[in-house]
Amino acid sequence: MNAKIEFGDFQTPKVLARRVVSLIANLYGAPDVVIEPTAGLGAFLTASTREWGADSKYIGYEINEGYVDLARKSLEGSDAQVFHRDFFSEDWKANIAQFGAKRVLVIGNPPWVTNSDLGQLRSSNLPKKSNFQGLRGLDACTGKSNFDIAEWMLIRLIDALPTDGALAMLCKTMTARKVLRHFWKTDGGRKDSMLFHIDAKTEFNVAVDACLFFVRGERTDNRSATVYENLDVFSKRTRFGFVDGDLVSDLDSYQQQRCLDGGSSLYTWRSGIKHDSSKVMEFTREGHRLINGLDEVVDIEDDYVFPLLKSSDLGNGRISIRKSVLATQRHTSDDTAEIKLKAPKTWEYLVRHADALDGRKSSIYENRPRFSIFGIGPYSYTPWKVAVSGFYKKVSFVLIPPCGSHPVMVDDTCYFIPCNSRKEAELLYMLLSSSQATAFFNSLIFIDSKRPITIEVLRRLSIVQLARSLGKFEELQHFVKYDSAEEKIGSQLSLLMESGGEYKTKRKRGRPLKL
């Protein structure tokens, strides 16, 4: 087992620890008590004793017994104490409460590792399992339930802070945002929420976006945080925050584009096809031959084979088809057994690779027809699409035409709006590629995220208001078709045109119209 991975073991350089402590001394002043809950070699305790001397009490906790001994030796001559403890078995509210109303500073560098990483290592160095993020349904059993261990730890520590206490921790920038979002969503803001960027490649030799995360224990109604370019309060800064139930990456820019926020009932953003077995389900074409990821020449019927564009294609503006995908269903509830009758060679191919397909680990395939896929529906088969990659830092939409008589699929790292005609697709492409839409999306996305562009961000754009602002609302109406169940929506849109107002849906409630 890789102990460095298991314990997220990135020891803080002494010079960095001293810079952090010096900054905290300016922000917070001298604390009565300094606690380093994951002390490691005691870099922050050492820097703190040099900064505040006998004016403060110093306590460290560390799970690695060897590190405890080394930290004690480095702190000889000071009053600092280092204890051999497991963070996850510690009652931090009781621990910190013992100091009463004193100024308690919790400082350090918690593990940079996710619960998924530890699960794969079969590590016991995990918190007790719970859905602490409050995820629902599918989100709770897919990738969204993965979290940095530091996220869980920081929430517990901030929860335990007294009003006059403070926390200063090195962590991934994304982790700090998630922690703040947790409190902004459930418990209000925290005073002086700040993020100071650090160069993690230089300091720790890891390619992640990292920061010093600082908050005070005092609660506030303010749900925003200031982000500094480096460990200097005079460096360039921006603000992000929590607006109407969602994070906003640049509050000042967002205010200029806020009229576009509100979602749209006219179109539903979709994610692409998900199969979790690219070597079996995806092919490259060599003339009329299909080659799978196992370098096998595949002889199957064309009925279930469709052109495929992947995230890297969309991110680089490519629409030339390099791949194909085997789509076993038109809807996730379809019985795949019919393939045996309609396309026997395709069925034989699936059965031949049943071990790989039946062994897919994601719980979304449980209790579904054999060889099922996900992210599939009638919308996947529309002839035109306007799509975007979720992985790229630049918001760049792509207009996807059909390939011959076949609709083009996109993979599950992409999002798209299905369109029934070229004119409809071209209009939506123009709207979504406009400078107004780009500015709006850029005010919401966090470019350091693994997947900066999410379906939640895309859904926030009001296509109606965007069309109005660009003088394209009447043109958009030509492509919106109503049935009897949609007459109410149609009348609301008519009133909207007459009044010049904006029809907004509630993002958190109800279902948008699916076209």
Image (cartoon, rainbow, N blue to C red):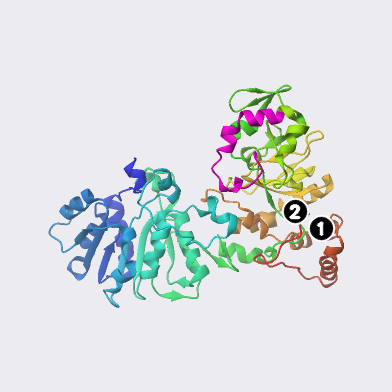
Q: Give the range drawn in magenta.
A: 346-371
Q: Are marks 2 and 1 in contact (CB under 8 Å)?
A: yes
Relative image position of residue 243 (x, y in whole percent)? 58, 68
Q: How far apart are marks 2 and 1 (CA)?
A: 8 Å
Q: Is residue 371 visible?
A: yes
SS for callout 2: helix
Residue under pointer 1 = 472
In this picture, is 346 found above or below 228? above
Residue 89 appears left or right of 321? left
Q: Nearer the viewer, residue 426 or 257?
A: 426
In the image, what residue occupies the spot 33% across and 62% down?
23
**Quarter of the rendering containing residue 151:** bottom left
User: Image check: 45 left or right of 242?
Assistant: left
Where, quadrant-wise, is the N terminus in this rendering?
top left
The residue shown at (61%, 31%) is 280
Instruction: Looking at the image, tell me whether mark 2 or mark 1 is earlier in sequence order.
Output: 2
On whether residue 352 falls in the magenta region, the answer is yes
For the C terminus, which image quadrant?
bottom right
> In this rendering, would 470 be left or right of 43?
right
In this picture, is 153 found above or below 297? below
Judged from the image, the secondary structure of the residue bearing numbered disc 1 is loop
Q: Where is residue 408 in the image (x, y as percent from the top left)?
A: 74, 38
Q: Which residue lies furthest to the left in this view?
A: 77
Residue 231 as seen in the image, left or right of residue 398: left
Q: Residue 254 location, x and y as percent?
A: 61, 63
Question: What amino acid is found at the position of numbered circle 2 in the picture?
Answer: Leu
Q: Is residue 233 visible?
A: no
Seen from the viewer's position, the closer of residues 293 and 250 is 293
The disc labelled 1 sits on which kind of residue? Answer: Lys
Disc sitting over residue 431 in the figure: 2
Q: In which quarter of the image is residue 500?
A: bottom right
Q: Nearer the viewer, residue 142 or 287?
A: 142
